[in-house]
Amino acid sequence: MTSINWIDFFILTFASFRITHFIVFDEITAFIRRPFMSEVFKEDPSGNTEKYIEIKGSGLRSWIGKLLSCYWCTGFWSALGVVLAYIYLPFAFPILLVFAVAGAAAILESKI
Protein backbone atom coordinates (compact mmCIF):
# COMPACT_ATOMS: atom_id res chain seq x y z
CA MET A 1 0.00 0.00 0.00
CA THR A 2 1.25 3.47 -0.82
CA SER A 3 1.85 5.75 2.12
CA ILE A 4 0.79 9.37 1.78
CA ASN A 5 1.64 12.30 4.01
CA TRP A 6 -0.86 15.01 4.98
CA ILE A 7 0.58 17.68 2.70
CA ASP A 8 0.33 15.42 -0.34
CA PHE A 9 -3.19 14.41 0.70
CA PHE A 10 -4.28 18.05 0.73
CA ILE A 11 -2.54 18.69 -2.58
CA LEU A 12 -4.40 15.76 -4.15
CA THR A 13 -7.67 16.93 -2.62
CA PHE A 14 -7.38 20.47 -3.95
CA ALA A 15 -6.14 19.22 -7.34
CA SER A 16 -9.11 16.87 -7.63
CA PHE A 17 -11.48 19.71 -6.68
CA ARG A 18 -10.03 22.04 -9.30
CA ILE A 19 -9.91 19.44 -12.07
CA THR A 20 -13.53 18.50 -11.37
CA HIS A 21 -14.64 22.12 -11.51
CA PHE A 22 -12.55 22.64 -14.64
CA ILE A 23 -14.34 19.78 -16.43
CA VAL A 24 -17.90 20.35 -15.18
CA PHE A 25 -18.22 24.14 -15.03
CA ASP A 26 -15.45 26.14 -16.71
CA GLU A 27 -16.17 27.82 -20.03
CA ILE A 28 -12.78 26.85 -21.42
CA THR A 29 -13.79 23.16 -21.35
CA ALA A 30 -17.25 23.67 -22.85
CA PHE A 31 -16.00 22.01 -26.04
CA ILE A 32 -15.62 18.76 -24.06
CA ARG A 33 -19.22 18.91 -22.81
CA ARG A 34 -20.85 20.24 -26.00
CA PRO A 35 -21.11 16.87 -27.86
CA PHE A 36 -22.87 15.33 -24.86
CA MET A 37 -25.14 18.06 -23.49
CA SER A 38 -26.61 21.42 -24.29
CA GLU A 39 -27.61 24.36 -22.15
CA VAL A 40 -31.21 25.49 -22.53
CA PHE A 41 -32.53 28.75 -21.13
CA LYS A 42 -36.19 28.97 -20.17
CA GLU A 43 -38.18 31.78 -18.65
CA ASP A 44 -40.26 30.86 -15.62
CA PRO A 45 -43.71 32.39 -14.90
CA SER A 46 -42.17 35.20 -12.83
CA GLY A 47 -39.92 36.27 -15.72
CA ASN A 48 -36.63 34.86 -14.40
CA THR A 49 -34.43 33.01 -16.85
CA GLU A 50 -33.24 29.61 -15.69
CA LYS A 51 -30.56 27.44 -17.24
CA TYR A 52 -31.20 23.74 -17.75
CA ILE A 53 -28.92 21.01 -19.00
CA GLU A 54 -30.26 18.65 -21.65
CA ILE A 55 -28.37 15.42 -22.21
CA LYS A 56 -27.91 14.52 -25.87
CA GLY A 57 -28.30 11.14 -27.53
CA SER A 58 -28.58 7.72 -25.98
CA GLY A 59 -26.32 4.90 -24.91
CA LEU A 60 -22.69 5.85 -24.34
CA ARG A 61 -23.23 9.45 -25.44
CA SER A 62 -26.03 9.90 -22.91
CA TRP A 63 -23.98 8.19 -20.18
CA ILE A 64 -21.04 10.54 -20.76
CA GLY A 65 -23.43 13.51 -20.77
CA LYS A 66 -24.87 12.42 -17.43
CA LEU A 67 -21.37 11.94 -16.05
CA LEU A 68 -20.20 15.38 -17.19
CA SER A 69 -23.29 17.08 -15.77
CA CYS A 70 -22.84 15.50 -12.34
CA TYR A 71 -20.28 17.20 -10.11
CA TRP A 72 -20.17 14.22 -7.74
CA CYS A 73 -19.72 11.67 -10.53
CA THR A 74 -17.00 13.61 -12.30
CA GLY A 75 -15.39 14.28 -8.92
CA PHE A 76 -15.01 10.57 -8.26
CA TRP A 77 -13.31 9.92 -11.61
CA SER A 78 -11.19 13.04 -11.21
CA ALA A 79 -10.05 11.87 -7.77
CA LEU A 80 -9.25 8.43 -9.15
CA GLY A 81 -7.16 9.96 -11.95
CA VAL A 82 -5.34 12.27 -9.54
CA VAL A 83 -4.49 9.42 -7.15
CA LEU A 84 -3.34 7.13 -9.97
CA ALA A 85 -1.21 9.93 -11.43
CA TYR A 86 0.31 10.53 -7.98
CA ILE A 87 1.15 6.84 -7.54
CA TYR A 88 2.21 5.84 -11.05
CA LEU A 89 3.32 9.08 -12.72
CA PRO A 90 5.52 10.96 -10.25
CA PHE A 91 6.54 13.43 -12.97
CA ALA A 92 2.89 14.64 -12.97
CA PHE A 93 3.16 15.96 -9.40
CA PRO A 94 4.09 19.54 -10.44
CA ILE A 95 0.95 19.67 -12.61
CA LEU A 96 -1.15 18.36 -9.73
CA LEU A 97 0.45 20.99 -7.51
CA VAL A 98 -0.57 23.77 -9.91
CA PHE A 99 -4.16 22.48 -9.95
CA ALA A 100 -4.06 22.28 -6.14
CA VAL A 101 -2.91 25.87 -5.76
CA ALA A 102 -5.59 26.98 -8.22
CA GLY A 103 -8.19 24.97 -6.31
CA ALA A 104 -7.19 26.42 -2.96
CA ALA A 105 -7.20 29.92 -4.46
CA ALA A 106 -10.69 29.33 -5.88
CA ILE A 107 -11.97 28.23 -2.49
CA LEU A 108 -10.41 31.22 -0.78
CA GLU A 109 -11.79 33.57 -3.41
CA SER A 110 -15.32 32.23 -3.02
CA LYS A 111 -15.17 32.57 0.78
CA ILE A 112 -13.74 36.10 0.93
Image (tube, helix red, strand yellow):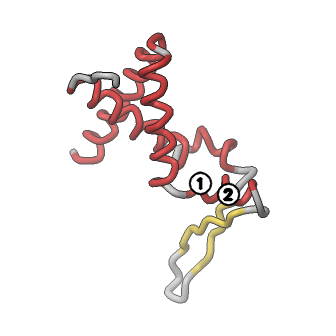
Q: Is residue 53 above or below residue 79?
A: below
Q: From the image, which quarter does the N terminus lie in?
A: top left
Q: From the image, which quarter does the C terminus lie in?
A: top left
Residue 61 locus on image (x, y percent):
75, 55
For label 1, the residue is 67
Residue 27 locus on image (x, y percent):
57, 44
Residues packed near mark 2 inside 10 Å, few (<14), some (14 to 19) or many (20 plus): some
Q: Amino acid type of disc 1?
A: Leu
Q: CA distance from mark 1 to mark 2?
A: 6 Å
Q: Is residue 25 above or below residue 37?
A: above
Residues packed near mark 1 inside 10 Å, few (<14), some (14 to 19) or many (20 plus): some
For label 2, the residue is 63
Q: Is residue 62 left or right of residue 49?
A: right
Q: Residue at x 47, y 53 (%)?
A: 71
Q: Identify the residue at the far bottom of this view.
A: 45
Front position in the image: 93 or 107: 93
